[in-house]
Amino acid sequence: MILPDYYEFCCRVKLVAGHDALEKIPSLLGEMGAQKPLIITDKGVAAAGLVDIVVKALSDGVVIGGIADNVPPDSDLKVVNQLAGLYRDNACDAIIAIGGGSVMDTAKGVNIVVSENATDLMAFSGAGALKRHLKPLVAVPTTAGTGSEVTLVAVIKDHEKHLKMLFTSYFLLPSVSILDSRMTMTMPPFITAMTGMDALSHAVEGYYCLQKNPLSDAHSLAAINMIFKNLPSVTKNPLDKDGRLAMAVAACLAGVSFSNSMVGLVHNLGHATGAVCGVPHGICMAMLLPYGLEYNMHKREDTIAELLLPIVGEEVYLQTSKSERADKVVSMIRQMNQDLNVITGGRHPRNLSEIKDRDGKQMVPRDVLPQIAQAAMLDGATIYNPEEQDYEDNLMVLDAAWEGRSLDRNKIKKG
Amino acid sequence: MNLAAGFTFICPFKTNSGNRALEHLPVELSDLNAFKPMIITSASLTGKKAIRTLIQAFGDSGMTLGLFDEVTDKADLSVVDQIKELYVHGKYDSIIALGAGLVADTAKLVNLAVSTKIADARKLSAEADIRGPLSPLVVVPTAGATGMETSKYAVLNRRTFVSVSLMPNLVILDPRLTKTCDPKITVESGMAAFGRTLEAYISSDKNPFMDAYAFTALRFIRENLAVAVNKRCNKQASLAVANAAAMSGCVLSNTGQNVLHRLGQIFQNIVHVHPGVMIGMCLNPFLDDCMKKDSSLVSSLLQPLAGDDKSAAMPEAGKAGEAFREIYGFSYEIYGALKGRMPRTISEAGISQFLMNDILEIINKEPDGAYLRTLVERVCGSSVRA
């Protein structure tokens, strides 16, 4: 195990996991001196009945200070301010955020406003502008993918001024994250597959990107092992309680890893594909993950080979010769997309050309690839990718990912 | 690993490790909203050179530093009260504990005193419920760290305070401070971390997050402790052991399995030996018992200790035995290289029967006292009896 010349590692969030972890929220709030939480969520989560489950779990010792389910898919400053008003009017003393990325972002934004008594959220944007502990924030993720329950970042958009505000601070971390199997039980197979692949992309990119360190590595390896063991079976059997819990834990492990080691090409091109074509993040990750490995192979072959053991287990690992291990990792990830494609009856795509919207229309036409390659040049994730990227390489990767064929590694410009 | 039973995990400290890690302190402190830290250390135990190195790392940051460097091995709650007065009077806003073991214990209790604004720190009660968050606390371990520095425990005068709130916000591992040219100091630190982590790693109540720390710590010690002994003054190897020690504090704070830890602590409290001495001594008999109870848990040790390839190649039935042999061979090498400086028995440690009786009295009060006694009996040696 290599001790880097210098590294930093941090995950300060308290994690509570289990089939009945939600029931622990009242005592966790009590430990933090809180008893009247505001619940923040979105319509989809509420419609799936997840808020009801949380409310029922809170029955003892907690007065619910309000339930707001109007978080939009894209965080919005207006909603942040409105929810902060609700928090104050109802004299709440904590926040419970139930949902995915945008709910977490919104809850973090509300927490800044109510804790700092802020009128202008902008004054707290950027890195390190927050200076003290905020109100207790309990994160209840419902996707088993994003890892946003352990990240210290929040993005809030001011749609009127067309501004995107980025907040980074340790004080933004949730006080507690609750990983409860019931919160992901109703996810349909297609969503289960893509969120699981999102988690896998965090764990795998976290393992080869530039800020990797022994602790982020250990989190990645555990996550990868759990995802390969559980993702296909949970996608097939949505009511598999233990599998759901394992995926929630794996996604959180992966979140811890990538928030420390950062991410590279997969996220870089994935963000751009999402921005240009509106493709869901998890799908972009799933389609591009094999290419992140292939693109960085000449710089990270030994590292990538280490992923084989948690993926295939001891027997297959031993049968695979050392020189073939890294390639086998790539083919196992391609196979995972293939398996998920079969399990979801074709809804989980295998390449960029297969991504379709609800009406069955192709979302990434081949002629937008240059636009994606260009947009990716502006995304920050490229800093942590082992090999440098440029426009031509981006386009070459996108072309291959569109067709679903392996990258011609001889054509990568090696820096 | 049985996830269905549910688990809770917390590690509130950030780790900064490596070259010039100390120079990150001003930025890290301001991220914690701290601008006027008080350094708590010991000129006699930690050494003046380490104190100078730490202070110089602040360079032209403009931060005002307080310094209390008179912690001794006799530190008690009156010293805590004395430091608390200085802290309050000097309007400090954070604490940096520089040193191993007792220095961190003292600093944690000063932090408790100043954060709860208790009038007289001598009245701090180990029984009281401690709820955070306390003021920012940074731990900067030096060579010979016990691993307790990063844990939820603070032990002073045989009294043990326990709370997650006592854990530091940040640990800085800088090779200039973790390096030592006395291999015995590294081995004490390494064995303490190794034993505590190993016990948690083979327990049935472990979870994947704690496991990540434990796996990393075990592998670091396996790969570096013998190197640190054989290549004296090796910066990289002692830094790796210091990393493992810091991780062991997190592991220990998240497990209920702590037989080896408690034995180390009891002997440290009564006869003032490094906990690594007792933990190292009891390691083999403890593992022996684990093998008899449930060898399948012991088999999981083979991967962190022997590496992926060797572990994968060993059939399941042979894994536990091989892990046992790994540990035996590894400790044999280390103890051998120290040529008797690391005692293998309580007799060799020079502990008198008189003190041993005191120790046994305490052991008997532990809920699993009868078992602890059987462990101690096996490492007594010739001149003392348990």
Image: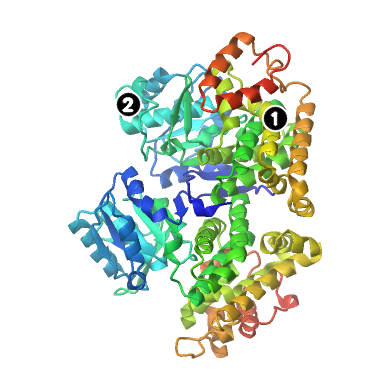
Q: Position of residue B79 (x, y in %)?
A: 42, 19
Q: Where is B287 relative to A126, above or below?
A: above
Label annotation for residue B310: none
Q: Classify mark 1: helix, strand or loop.
A: helix
Residue A58 picture quarter: bottom left
Check the image and name the residue furthest to the top: B354
Between B369 and B165, the one lying in front of the other is B369
Q: Can residue B48 be seen in this view?
A: no
Q: Left or right: where does residue A129 sit relative to residue B366?
A: left
Q: Is the C terminus of chain B in the top left, top right, bottom left or bottom right quadrant?
A: top right
User: Residue visible at 49% across and 41% down?
Assistant: B170
Looking at the picture, tell me which residue is in the foreground, B370 or B226.
Answer: B370
- The CA distance from mark 1 to mark 2 is 51 Å
Tell me the amino acid under the disc marked 1: Pro
Chain of the residue displaying label 2: B
Q: What colour scheme does the image use?
A: rainbow
Residue A201 x/y as whole percent: 58, 67
The one nearer the camera, B21 or A406, is: A406
* Left or right of B263 on screen, residue B162: left
Chain letter of the residue beneath label 1 in the structure image? B
Q: Position of residue A328 (x, y in %)?
A: 73, 69
Q: What kind of element bears circle 2?
A: helix
The residue where tag 1 is placed is B285
Label 1 or label 2, whichever comes before in sequence order: 2
Q: In this view, does B336 lie above or below A182?
A: above
Nearer the camera: disc 1 or disc 2: 1
In depth, the one of B61 and A179 nearer the eye is: A179
On the image, numbered disc 2 is attached to which residue? B89
User: Residue placed at 73% from the left, 44% from the top?
Assistant: B320
Query: Residue A220: x, y in percent?
Result: 60, 58
Q: Are marks 1 and 2 in contact (CB under 8 Å)?
A: no
